[in-house]
Amino acid sequence: MEIRFRYPLLFTFLTFGVYASQAAPTMYVDGTTGGGRMAAILYYSYMIWLVGNVVYWAGWLCRRTGRFREYLDKTVEKLKKYLVVYCGIVGVILAAVIYRFDLRDVSSYKAYRDWKQGWAEQYAKEWDERIEILRDDSVKKVEFQPLTVYPEMLLYTDLQPETGYIWVNSACAQYYGKEGVTITMP
């Protein structure tokens, strides 16, 4: 496969357009870049597009000066030699840091814990039971018991009691064609 890097200005304008279009919906709706999640998405996509543009422009410059193939061959050889060793060293260091400092906030640890303790399976079972009731057209007002487990890696929010953020319940009711969906507290 031959990479040509022919149109760096066009590439830059297109990537900027895609980046700007990510912010357009929230800017249109409420005049801001959105909440914390949206800001994080914009920040990380900015980094991706920035790196992509640097690589594209560097490729274009190398191509223009005629040193592209030679540079690419050297880079690939270096990567082959050091990438596996680098990943192994970083993995061992990361495992040591997690073990030494008891970093239980690391997402991979949380996912493992949710799986190992059976929380993910219990959560899926309880939601399967809820979905079965929600899909039943004969039931118009639905009341559920709270979930018994809250696996952090799977759960953003649950349905709410009458005093909670009931927009979650109304969205669920509207989606499934119910008159109301709520959680009854024991």
Image (spheres, rainbow, N blue to C red):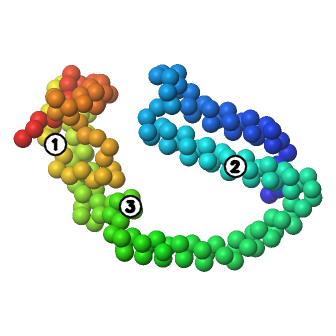
The foreground one among 43 and 73 is: 43
Drawn side of residue 170 relative to residue 97, left or right: left
Identify residue type, mark 2. Answer: Gly
Q: Is residue 103 left or right of residue 134?
A: right
Query: Residue 52: which disc?
Result: 2
- Residue sitting at x 42%, y 72%: 97
Q: Nearer the viewer, residue 182 or 43?
A: 43
* Residue 137 seen in the current view: no
Residue holding disc 3: 106
Residue 54 in the image, given as x and y percentages of width and height: 74, 50
Spatial CA distance of label 1 from label 2 is: 46 Å
Quick one: label 2, few (<14), some, or many (20+) residues within 10 Å?
A: some
| Label 3 or label 2, whichever comes before in sequence order | 2
Is 46 located above or below residue 71 in the figure? above
The answer to the question of whether label 3 and label 2 lie on touching residues, with beta carbons closer than 8 A, is no
Mark closer to the chain start, 1 or 2: 2
Measure how far apart labels 1 and 3 are at the Cα level.
27 Å
The picture places residue 65, in percent across and down from the top left corner, at: 92, 56
Name the residue furthest front: 101
- The residue that appears at 52% across and 42% down in the rendered structure is 41
